[in-house]
Image (tube, rainbow, N blue to C red):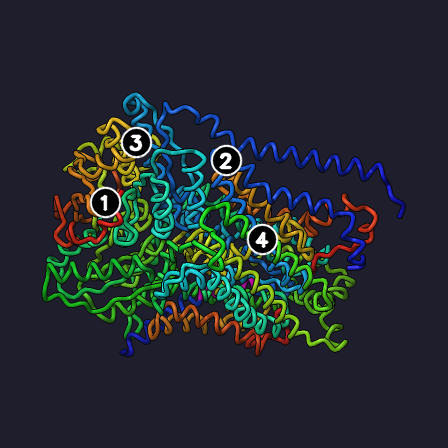
Amino acid sequence: MNLTMIALQTMNGLTIAAIYILLASGLTIVLGLQGIINTAHGFFYMLGAYIGLTLVSYTDLGFWLCLPAAFLVTSLLGAGLEASGIRTLTKWNRGHVHQVVLTLGFAIVGTEVVKFIWGTVPQNTSVPALLRGAISLGPIVYPKYWLFVIGSSISIMAALWIFFHWTGLGILVRSIDINREASEALGTNAPLLTTVIFGLGTGIAGVAGVLAGPILGLDPNMGFELLMVLFVVIILGGLGSLMGTVVSGILIGLIIAYGTMLLSGLAAKILVFGVMIVILIFRPTGLLGRGVAVK
Amino acid sequence: MPKKKIDKGVNRRTFLKMGSGAMVAVGANWFLPNIVLGSDDEIRLGALAALSGPVAPFGVEQANGIKLAVEQYNEKGGINGRKIKLLLEDTESKKDAGLANTRKLVERDKVHFLTGVCLSSIVMAMQPYIKEKKTIFVNSNSGNDILVKPPHCNRYYFKELISAWTITLAIQEPAKRVGKKWYFMADNYTHGKEIVDYAQKSLKAAVPDAEIVGADFPNLGESNYAPYLTKVMAAKPDGLFVGTIGAGYVRTIKQARQMGLDCHLHTFCWFHPLAMAIGKDIVGTTTAALYIPNNPKVPRAREIADLYKKKFGHWPSTMAGEGFNGVECIFEAVKKAGTTDTEPVIETMESMEYKNTILSPSFRFRKSDHQAIRALFTAEAVKDPTFTYGLKVLRYQPNPTEYLVPGDKTGCDKYMKF
Amino acid sequence: MPTSHAQRTRPVIHWWLSVGVILVVLPVAFSLTTFSDYLTYVVVRMMILALFAMSFDIVYGYAGMFSLGHATFLGGGAYVAGILMRQIGLDIQDALPALLAAMLFGVLMGWLMGFLASRLASPLAVLLVTFAIAETLGLLVMADPLNITNADNGISGIPRQTLGWIIGIKSEVAFYYVVLAILSLSFFALRAIVRSPFGDTLLAIRENRQRASFLGYRVTHYQMAAFMVSGFFASLAGALTAFHERSCSPEMFNFFVSGDAFIYTVLGGSGTLVGPLIGTTIIITAQEIIGDLFHNWLFFLGLIYIGLIMFMPGGLYPLVRKYLNPVQNSCVQDTTPRS
């Protein structure tokens, strides 16, 4: 076990963490700030990847325009799901379990539609020409595109942090979380904002899908595979906490990378579940949670 | 609240009406096939394929191959004047659904023969059942060799896919070319472990001083192979044996090349749609080619590939070829035997030599365990003007039986009895 | 539930009788067709899954915890039976020890799940933890570290000869009556449990956990007990599945299996015990027909998920009961858990 190996394995952990963090951020703002649990999140990630694939293959928009296009489509669809289904459930005062079942049903139907349109065979998008090849970072050589994914994740997270802390809209959203009635009494259109934020979350999932496509490949089950890990990430990080999500995403990414290296892939997977159960029992607010337990 | 007698009566009556209506509908649906199927003029072929679920990419192709083969026979006027009726059912990539649908085909639809299926767990659940019901089952596409070993082998089960051990012989040719140090990687499940074991034996048989520098088994359906590939890079092998399947196969090769792993890649088996998904990184890898659409040894393969392309809009994959061949295995024997009765057909299949199949110039089932024996092609992936990515044959073994358990030592004799 | 038990039972007794008679003569009716074994096989599967769904109802409908890990019991029970009958070299031909072992496994696993679930603050956490347990068990069965589960191939060729060394269960029809007997016994046992003070306490905890604990009930103990009861019957269903299909495989731990239990229960009406029976019958029948026509069951399953939650969270049984018995149930509240 030499230094190069460890450095490389760390970078692997960070790359996968970058994708987890992007996906988990959408899930955590929706769950933490608005109390909506979205099990269709993985579906939006998958859909984003497929939209990216289609745009790259059938139009000459190229990779760079795929990102906003995927964001637009997945966020509109997400907003539609919120406005047509989840909002009604909230109005009827139904709990999380009903949201889980509704979004799961949506994801199952959506996945079947995706299979119908794009087929079940795994597909792949290629890395954009600008980012092909690898560059050397001290002792190791690492693919440019993978570094680009890490970079994108950092910038999107920074943008989200700025949005929630420094912009008026972001502060309004947080005000709804703190006290919905008071905020509404002051004239905030809470249902509309919920829809917007839900769309933002699913949109980020779509972008993550486009970004992950060239690394992880595309197949209709890719969303379901990741969903559980994402829940571990957001619970560990503390619901609604962007910083917490970053920290726990990196932690889980590294656990998987090192666990695979030192133990086995299976042990790494079981370890992740173990971490979740322990956290839920002993510290339901997560690592950096602000006292909001998993509700 | 006062009791509303009339309401109650009407309601219950409506309820009963609805109930009996539903019952009639259900009954009609279930009994209809039987009435329609009354005559014995046609030969009913039951096909099971994973049309949904995780192995659907393979199952759909397999079903396409089966459909094409049946269509071909029917266009030529059927078998001995009888048309073939294809009854296709979904296994949902699940054992319980696979078994239930097998029972439906055998008991309700009274099929003469069964074919298809790629997951060996489903096959294993089916084997005792088809033995009990004495229904011939030609299993295209299950690679697991356990299926033809005791206690699973039986008289009514035919394994159309070549032995997994034989498939791994394909590693010998690249091993002679690229070097002695090899690393092995396959999914963490029975078949994955089996093929790594066989591939290591095949490697040692061809290159006795070959060095196995490592073996790793990622979880089935893993999304990120980078941690495993880092281990491969640290071992610095000359060649990597890639035994991951489906999406994992695509990810392994893509991620290996992106990470700059530049050793030779030998893949267990070739699947055209996945090669297309991998793109140019597939060029230069070697593989066992079970079905080559433009196989120079079997000119007929190309005709069928063209028909397939015309019907389904894309080139046939290995699974489609195997599915097609499975149907031919049954009906060539039926033609020769002149009957659909089980015993004569089994005897014909055991003794006959299939010539000019789309997979291999010669093909037969071994009498002792019903394992298919056919040619093996070792091939290199190349750019191809027609297929985008095609195969160039490196080595042709017309009758590769040297590493199989000898026919008289399979231990299946007592399971093979009538 | 506000209506008293005696009042509720009497007027519907002839419905019970007719259902019983239909179930008893069903194999005879099937024997008139040319594929009676298959029909019997389907109905047996329906009954086993109904038992599984009823056990889920105890945890979801009565104790108010959403377990997305009930597949643990179905798969685990099946594997316990499979391993005992086939894998460890004991030459047992009788099904009884396997059923008992599976039920023991179910109680122990139910204790573990209940222990974890009762310490969690929220339904969401319960959902995630139970899911993780089922998934981990599925992974372990798949990886097969002890070399007893045959990994992905599963266990096949499980013998089905006798039950209790007396009753032959080899034929489909004999097995049908055995499963019918087990289902009926389980149903009446579960009904006795939920109508006992224990069941009332579970309902109280479901409605208001805090108030129940203020009243002096040890909430965690009750929740654990609910999981153990549920695990007992769910694992029994699992072992029966192993004998029914004569094999078991890792996809029995899939979360869709747990999801199915939820759908059967909610479609029929959760917290009613009869609901799961109705729900299972409808869904399995629909699955047979739709699967036959369209080859795409998952799409319809997704639609059922959405439709149920949006339009019929209370389920069918409360509606049926209203038709059968408009007076007494006019004041029955919506019994859906709002977790």
Chain to which mark 2 belongs: C
Name the chain under label 3: B
Q: Amino acid at mark 1?
A: His
**Number of the label disc, if any, that sits on residue C293:** 2
Separation of residues labelled 1 and 3 (CA atoms): 18 Å
Q: Is residue A69 left or right of residue B272?
A: right
Q: Which mark is residue B370?
A: 1
- Quarter of the image containing the C terminus of chain C? bottom right
What is the distance, in whole Å, between disc 2 and disc 1 at their CAs? Answer: 34 Å
The magenta region covers: A18-27
Q: Residues within 10 Å of mark 1 (few under 14, many from 20)?
A: many
Q: Tag 2's secondary structure?
A: helix
Image quadrant of residue B62? top left
Furthest residue in direction right, as rendered: B2
Residue that mark 3 sits on = B341
Contact check, label 2 and label 4, Cβ < 8 Å: no
Is B261 placed above or below A124 here?
Answer: below
Does residue A156 appear anywhere in the picture? Answer: no
The CA distance from mark 2 to mark 3 is 30 Å
Q: Secondary structure at mark 3?
A: loop
In this rendering, the answer to whether B274 lies above or below C134 is above
* Quadrant location, the N terminus of chain C: bottom right
Q: Are marks 3 and 4 in contact (CB under 8 Å)?
A: no
- Residue count near mark 2 (Cα–Cα under 10 Å), binned few <14, some 14–19, many ≥20: few
Magenta span includes C276: no
Of tags 2 and 3, the one toward the viewer is 3
